[in-house]
Amino acid sequence: MRQLEISDLITAVDPHTGRRLPVQRSEVMRQLREADDERAARIVARMPTDEDGVLDPYAVDRLVVLVHTELQRLSEELRIDERLVHVLGPLLAAIRATTGRSGPFRLVDVGCGLGYLVRRLAATGALGEDVELVGVDLDGTLVGEAERLALADGLDCRFVHGNAFDLPEAATVYVSTGVLHHFRGPALEAFFQAQAASTALAFCHFDIAANRLAPIGAWIFHRARMRHPLGRHDGVVSALRAHDDETLLRAASVPGIRALVYEPRGMSNPFCTTLRPVIGVRPDLEEPLRRSLGRGARRLVGPEHFAVGAR
């Protein structure tokens, strides 16, 4: 059965300009019912529209901000920033050693939402003063809220409304959390191809670890932490849609990139591993990265581990 997240359907933007597009409530409900998800259709049925049946964009924006605010609790409780730094620290060390540069190095968070990760990294300074922190999202409302929160805390970071791969200034490293499962099939491959075609040296994308316990854990957490039915629904569906390690490595193994998974299934405890990263580096960075990781390099495996092969 096809799994759909409500949040993916109730907002639509032009991927090139970021311009908001109208969304018909009846069309969203039709897609959900075709996916045999009547519960989700009932959630959408309660959302306000104008006289033409178009979802009220202001109501949608309020709901999206609410849900993302609640999702921030998940990032805080799972210490996502610390997990990212555990991998990004050695990755940036490898980049510094290989390039001989002193910076600046630009980290771009793709689909940053409310910018929790970027704001947290700016607050802790964990990656060093030579790392510029940029969050990018196609949702202008979320970017505006991220900017407001960063300004309130006096943080040295910035946020951009638009396409992360169309920025005038090139990224050194692309990162994301909880984004990969939103892409399916050719769209997932295109996501990685866009990064390989850029001048970026690496990427590090954390997403839900696909195991049998993930949907159960998602259900427990979201029932306990999320107040709105949409957040509860989408949290579980996200876990059900998570890509397995082989799928991610196959999609990420594009020319010019060495794809790796850190803590893959079979090398981690499913009771403890909720998210794990797929990493991509330019080929000359793999050995420096492994040296920087030290003993942690044993947790890093490539496509050959699953016999999926690099293309």
Image: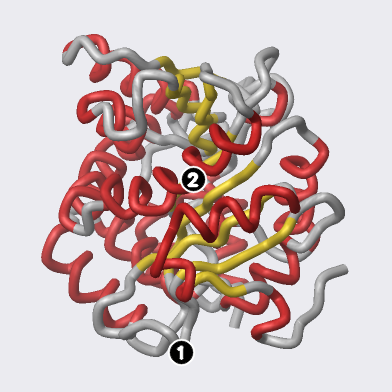
Q: How many labels does the image show?
A: 2
Q: Where is residue 190 in the image (x, y as percent from the top left)?
A: 78, 50
Secondary element under disc 2, as helix, strand or loop, is strand
Relative to 174, say whether 184 is above or below.
below
Q: Where is residue 230 in the image (x, y as percent from the top left)?
A: 33, 56
Q: Can residue 53 be seen in this view?
A: no
Relative to 26, say whether 275 is above or below.
below
Answer left or right for 157 relative to 53: left
Q: Is residue 166 visible?
A: yes
Q: Which amino acid does label 2 sit on?
A: Ser
| Residue mark closest to the camera, 2 vs 1 | 1
Residue at the (65%, 72%) spot, across then down? 302
Residue at the (44%, 18%) spot, across then down? 159
Question: Disc 2 or 1, which lies upstream in sequence?
Answer: 2
Label 1 sits on residue: 266
Residue at the (48%, 61%) spot, across then down? 277
Of the 4 image quadrants, the one containing the C terminus is bottom right
Label 2 sits on residue: 176
Task: Please tell me how crowded label 2 is: few (under 14), some (14-19), or many (20+) other residues with Cα within 10 Å.
Answer: many
